[in-house]
Amino acid sequence: MTPEVLIQHAITAKNRAMAPYSNYSVGAAILTETNSVILGCNVESKAYPTTLCAERVAIFSAISQGFNKFTALALITNDGAFPCGSCRQIIHEYAPDIPIYIADKSADFITKNSSELLPFPFG
């Protein structure tokens, strides 16, 4: 699957985000080794620490559906923001060394991998 197609899936996920407090919607799409695409979007809570990021939702959803090998991850925000520290750690643990396509609202993207995002991970 091309990065552009995976980013389109992430756009679908971003449109499902529940971000009533920050108004900052994020979408993620993770590609499994069997070519299934699992979506994730950020879901906010009034108790802000209980909010979940799109990347973790996608990875945890994939794992809960029985997938544990991944080949790519796409992430989209309006401004092309990189994953937060918590997400970087989860990416490192569950989806290491895969390309991560980080896109902005125009779907322009850059490609990074987990070691670039988190050079000194826990574990």
Image (cartoon, rainbow, N blue to C red):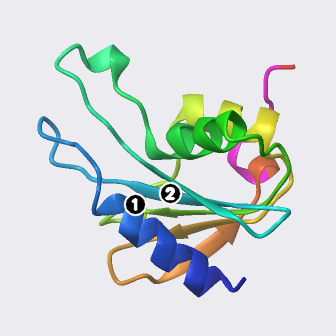
Q: Which mark is residue 73?
A: none
Q: Is residue 105 visible?
A: yes
Q: What residue is shown at x 23% (from left), y 23% (from top)?
A: 45
Q: Residues within 10 Å of mark 2 (few under 14, many from 20)?
A: many
From the viewer's perspective, tell me whether residue 31 is left or right of residue 81.
Answer: right
Q: Are marks 1 and 2 in contact (CB under 8 Å)?
A: yes
> Looking at the magenta stretch, what is its main secondary structure?
loop
Quarter of the picture containing the C terminus is top right
Write the start and end of the magenta stretch as one range: 116-122
Q: What residue is shown at x 42% (from left), y 57% (from top)?
A: 27
Task: Check the image and report above or below for 20 versus 78.
Answer: above
Secondary structure at badge 2 equals strand
Q: What residue is shown at x 56% (from left), y 46% (from top)?
A: 58
Q: Which mark is residue 28?
A: 2
Quarter of the picture containing the N terminus is bottom right
Residue toward you, 102 or 13? 13
The residue that label 1 is drawn on is 13
Q: Amino acid at mark 1?
A: Ala
Q: What residue is shown at x 86% (from left), y 54% (from top)?
A: 97
